């Protein structure tokens, strides 16, 4: 195996270039956790792997709790499967709490105060309550928690409650997100020991994201490199490995076969697991592209992938009945390559059920 082989194998492992999955929860379960602070971009990440579905189908799945959105792995939102949320939190929440330590101190949220907030939020949500962030803040304020009606303090109160397994995403109310009591919204699931949870997370990452390194896993999971190595010690007999440029890459012994006539081009959210799931991205883009993307900072929202390689960026603009996609390529494209990207843009429009206008910059 060479570095140049990795991109195509990852496309297949992530079900971008292999047989599509059937349901949103299947995609989320396969990838284990799908970064979702950009809710719309995260839905598109699922939609790419569910080509028979449109955005409304994913909204419906979310609103009945078939997929959940919560803080897990790292201090950001992820989609997770209901049966996975508890063991993922048990495994990764301590690390996220530790990373939030400075923010907790700055917002005067010691452990005793956070526990009190958990009790208030649980009471406010009991018996099937679904409350917005603003309504949670009001409940905290009425119960005597100061400066909790909005702002940074409320953000960390709610995140802490998510990490403690008190609350999770509920159905949306119009365009507003709500929260639900986790134990009411999510059915019970089989418990795992710490070693079982670590082994399962390690196994799933390398099966779905491989070929990848232990450094990729530590970066993605939020766990320590030592944890990652312990996980690999447990599951390495279930994986294949290859040495490339002095790095050990781990991957599934049964990589999903490539679908018939797979897409050459993809428009991906910058938070798609194909991009965000790795510490080292040399396998999917060259140094020039890496530098150009880095210069964009928070302005970067969508990337262009052609034959497994990042070759540019794009920006989407939604109108009432149409979608405009502005494309910037880092190199000159052939007519066939432009057509492949036009097909990718068309797929985006079909997902949103909008007419597409493609604009080349």
Image: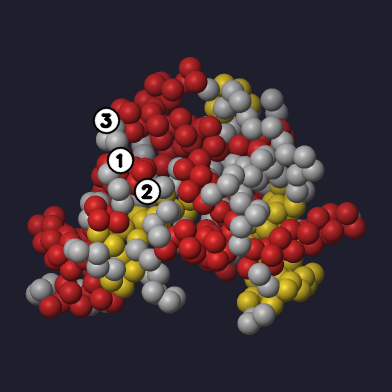
- Is 75 on the left-hand or right-hand side of 271? left
Q: What residue would you read off at disc 3? A: 193
Q: CA distance from mark 3 to mark 1?
A: 13 Å
Q: Is residue 314 above or below residue 201?
A: below
Describe the colour scheme in one phrase: secondary structure
Q: Residue furthest top?
A: 237
Q: Nearer the viewer, residue 70 or 58?
A: 58
**Residue at the spot of label 2:** 82
Which one is in front in this view, the residue at disc 3 or the one at disc 1?
1
Residue, x 36% and y 39% (percent of image)? 223
Above or below, 269 relative to 81 = below
**Crowding at label 1, few (<14), some or many (≥20) Cα neighbours within 10 Å?**
few
Which quadrant of the figure contains the C terminus?
bottom right
- On the image, numbered disc 1 is attached to which residue? 189
Query: Circle 2 — which element?
Result: helix
Cα–Cα gap, marks 2 and 3: 18 Å
Which part of the image, by quadrant, shows the N terminus?
top right
Counting from the top left corner in percent of width and height, residue 317 is at 64, 75
Give me the C-alpha separation between circle 1 and circle 2: 8 Å
Q: Residue at x 81, y 55 (%)?
A: 340
The residue that appears at 61% across and 51% down in the rendered structure is 50
Between marks 2 and 3 in the image, the one whose residue lies nearer the viewer: 2
């Amino acid at each position: 195996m060479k570095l140049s082989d990795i991109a195509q194998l990852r496309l297949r492992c992530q079900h971008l270039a292999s047989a599509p999955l059937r349901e949103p929860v299947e995609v989320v379960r396969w990838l284990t956790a799908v970064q979702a602070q950009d809710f719309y971009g995260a839905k598109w990440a699922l939609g790419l792997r569910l080509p028979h579905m449109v955005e409304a189908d994913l909204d419906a799945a979310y609103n009945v709790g078939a997929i959940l959105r919560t803080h897990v792995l790292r201090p950001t939102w992820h989609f997770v499967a209901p049966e996975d949320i508890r063991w993922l939190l048990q495994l990764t929440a301590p690390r996220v709490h530790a990373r939030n330590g400075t923010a907790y101190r700055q917002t005067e949220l010691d452990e005793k105060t956070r526990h009190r907030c958990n009790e208030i939020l649980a009471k406010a949500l009991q018996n099937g309550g679904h409350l917005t962030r603003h309504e949670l803040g009001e409940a905290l304020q009425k119960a005597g928690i100061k400066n909790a009606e909005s702002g940074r303090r409320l953000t960390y109160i709610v995140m802490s409650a998510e990490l403690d397994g008190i609350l999770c995403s509920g159905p949306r109310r119009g365009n507003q997100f709500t929260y639900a009591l986790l134990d009411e919204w999510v059915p019970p699931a089989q418990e795992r020991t710490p070693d079982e949870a670590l082994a399962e997370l390690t196994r799933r990452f390398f099966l779905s994201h491989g070929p990848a390194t232990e450094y990729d896993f530590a970066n993605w999971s939020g766990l320590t490199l030592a944890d990652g190595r312990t996980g690999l010690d447990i599951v390495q007999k279930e994986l294949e490995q290859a040495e490339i440029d002095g790095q050990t890459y781990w991957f599934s012994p049964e990589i999903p076969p490539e679908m018939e006539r797979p897409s050459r081009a993809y428009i991906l959210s910058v938070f798609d697991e194909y991009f965000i799931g790795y510490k080292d991205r040399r396998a999917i883009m060259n140094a020039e592209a890496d530098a150009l993307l880095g210069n964009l900072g928070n302005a970067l929202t969508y990337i262009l992938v052609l034959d497994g390689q990042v070759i540019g960026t794009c920006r989407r603009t939604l109108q009432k009945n149409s979608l405009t996609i502005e494309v910037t390529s880092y190199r000159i494209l052939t007519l066939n390559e432009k057509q492949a990207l036009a097909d990718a843009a068309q797929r985006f429009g079909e997902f949103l059920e909008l007419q597409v206008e493609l604009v080349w910059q």
